[in-house]
Amino acid sequence: MLRNCPVHLSLMSEAMRFVSIRICALLAGLFLATGALAEAGTASKLLKIAYVDFPPMTYQKADGSPAGTFIEITRKVAIEAGYEPEFLYLPISRVYLYLRNGRIDVWPGSANVPALKGEVLETWVSPFASQLSAWYLEGTEPLSHFDQLQGKTVITIAGYTYGGLLYWLEGESSIDVTQAPNYRAALDMLKLSRGHYLFGHRDPVLETLAMSEDEKIRESEIRLRNLTWLFSLANPRAAILREEFDDAYLRLAEQGEVPPIREFGESFVIPGFPEQYR
């Protein structure tokens, strides 16, 4: 019967074309939506990680890429936790600012930074400890008590507060504080007797000393602090990120991919060290 009804055949053909077009449009929309979701998922897994000049733990190579022992472990833990790490090289003051306003997600750095109190969450695990020492020339009295700093000049590294200790030093009228832009300049100032003691962390100082063979420089230990990962509380997922990092570190430690879990215990502090900055 339909063979003799060209009008009906034409209508059916138009309807089929309309259905085909609708199906193609729906498939195209589904494809675009899937792509957008995938892109959004990838973006949400990007982790912005700040790092500073603190060799050999964290530093920037000549080609601009991040390097150092702490960098490599951070990369492993971030990937194990399911994130894509993006490293940003910043001065320490900028790191503090960006943690406060959420422009970075995490910083591999020192625990218990007074300037960041209430601004960050720290991981429970600590892969390393950092030794702050007083460096001095052979012939100078070793620093065994903080009272010995009275009437002396202390060289510090620009940008570092030493966990707030810098504020105490600057507030003591009988202690002169001078700054150097980096460890190499600070050691040169010490050799030129522009200060009695240089406050510097052991790893970067030894890294610099090894390059220049400064044989007459000696060390007195001041304080041992834990290194950890600090997550910005400006990020609403800070608590989740911390838990994911802790869990990832534990898994990697079991596999021998990262240093074993450290016992925090009591950290060494030199006698006379200001109580509020311990």
Image (cartoon, grey):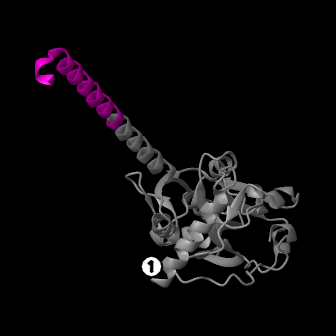
Q: Position of residue 177 (x, y in %)?
A: 76, 57
Residue 225 position in % (x across, y down): 69, 73
Q: Is residue 183 left or right of residue 96?
A: left
The answer to whether residue 192 is visible is no
Q: Main secondary structure of the magenta part?
A: helix
The residue tagged 1 is 257
Residue lying at 68% horizontally and 47% vertically, measured from the top left: 97
- Residue 6 sits in which quadrant? top left
* Image quadrant in which you'd find residue 278: bottom right
Relative to residue 274, is residue 53 depicted above or below?
above
Q: Give coordinates of residue 204: x percent, y percent.
A: 55, 67
Q: Nearer the viewer, residue 242 or 170?
A: 242
Residue 9 is a magenta residue: yes
State left or right for residue 73 relative to residue 245: left
In front here: 100 or 33?
Answer: 33
Residue furthest out toward the front: 1
Give the magenta range.
1-27
Give the side of residue 71 with respect to residue 243, left or right.
left
Assign the N terminus to one quadrant of the image. Answer: top left
Give the residue at the far left of this rendering: 3
Residue 106 inside the magenta-drawn segment? no
Instruction: State the residue at coordinates (57%, 73%).
Output: 247
Depth check, front residue: 9 or 42: 9
Looking at the image, which residue sits at the far right?
A: 173
Q: Is residue 12 above or below residue 54?
A: above
Q: Residue at x 62, y 65 (%)?
A: 242
- Is 246 positioned to the left or the right of 115 in the image? left
